[in-house]
Amino acid sequence: MLRYHALMAMPSRLLSVTRTLCSAALKFDGAVSMVQGASRGIGLEFVKQLLENNDKGHVVATCRNPNGSTGLINLKDRFAERLSILQLDVTMENSIEATARSIKETYGRLNLLINASGILSIPEVLQPETTLSKVEKSSLMLAYEVNAVGPILVIKHMWPLLKVGGGYGTEKDVAVVASLSARVGSIGDNRLGGWHSYRSSKTALNQLTKTISVEFARKKDPIACILLHPGTVDTDLSRPYQRNVPQDKLFTKEFSAQKLLSTINNVKRHDNGKFFAWDGQEIPW
Ligand SMILES: NC(=O)c1ccc[n+]([C@@H]2O[C@H](COP(=O)([O-])OP(=O)(O)OC[C@H]3O[C@@H](n4cnc5c(N)ncnc54)[C@H](OP(=O)(O)O)[C@@H]3O)[C@@H](O)[C@H]2O)c1
């Protein structure tokens, strides 16, 4: 809390901004986290662990169809006071703007933003390509729109709300933005080829995130923007492609989310713009 004489020494415009932030922040002691892409899979597991592991933390979970996510509805029954569920489709920018307005009105800030949404395949619409001859313009554009453009627009609209105090607690000196990428998005690590649309959409997400991180650093904005590879995780996304994955390399969503939250919680300012695997190791671009 700011002391009285410190408030009196402030210019009036800054004072009114500070009063607004203080009055909003006063209602909520703990960190305010947003998980985008929270209906199922790793995103839903992030919401669960953030709520279970921090009894003061508030979580805003967003998804395309809140009424269709039984996982989120069950969590709302358990954590009615600390969980908000909002509708957001990353391909609809007005839904992103509406979410930012709602968070501003209710909480006044965000300490942690996780972009967990993503697509790899959609029956009859999008299939991971095995050869150049299967590459279609529509698949490339769809993967870029959902996996690269969408998460960046989310960061753009949440940026004014991002304040220090990320991770589980409120002790950090940076707000954290973590987007789920994939190791296959690494150009340096590309030895197998294939999956042109998904792979290159994650590469685009990586470059856009790196570019944002440079701007945050240049403006001395205390935000650490990172990319995370969750490992191969047993979810709807990976299920059709798990046949050749050794059992010990196929993670549960509980294990992966726990490892990623541990990395998020340990993020320091100098980690801004880095790409980490589930075990905390940096991945080459
Ligand atoms: N699972 C893995 O092995 C693996 C490996 C590497 C990277 N990843 C990345 O990790 C992230 C999470 O994957 P997952 O395995 O949890 O996948 P998942 O179980 O298929 O969940 C994907 C999530 O993305 C959401 N989504 C899709 N399109 C959206 C849109 N237009 N707007 C908002 N949300 C949208 C889905 O919502 P709906 O329910 O509405 O469809 C769902 O909540 C993804 O970015 C993925 O690329 C996963």
Image (cartoon, grey):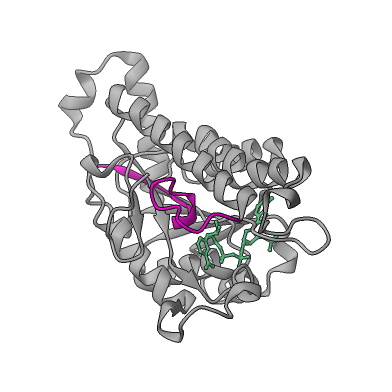
Give coordinates of residue 199: x percent, y percent.
Answer: 55, 50
Who is closer to the viewer here, 195 or 46? 195
Extreme residue in the right direction:
124
Extreme residue in the bottom direction:
247
Q: Residue at x 33, y 19 (%)?
A: 14
**Which quarter of the figure is the N terminus placed in?**
top left
Give coordinates of residue 62: x percent, y percent.
Answer: 60, 55
Give coordinates of residue 58: x percent, y percent.
Answer: 44, 58
Instruction: From this view, report whether residue 62 is shown above or below residue 249.
Output: above
Q: Residue at x 17, y 26 (%)?
A: 6
Who is closer to the viewer here, 188 or 231? 188
Instruction: From this view, report whether residue 53 is shown above or below residue 228.
Output: below
Give coordinates of residue 97: x percent, y percent.
Answer: 63, 35
In this image, 8 relative to 245: left or right? Answer: left
Q: Residue at x 30, y 47 (%)?
A: 165
Q: Quadrant of residue 255?
A: bottom left
Q: Residue at x 68, y 74 (%)?
A: 70
Instruction: From this view, report whether residue 102 is shown above or below residue 267.
Output: above
In this image, 123 relative to 195: left or right? Answer: right
Q: Is residue 30 visible?
A: no
Who is closer to the viewer here, 12 or 103? 103
**Which quarter of the figure is the C terminus placed in?**
top left
Residue 2: say if magenta. Answer: no
Q: Is residue 262 visible?
A: yes
Q: Which residues are magenta?
A: 174-194
Instruction: From this view, report whether residue 35 is shown above or below residue 17.
Output: below
- For ligand 1, the image quadrant comes to bottom right
Residue 176: say if magenta. Answer: yes
In this image, 57 relative to 62: left or right? Answer: left
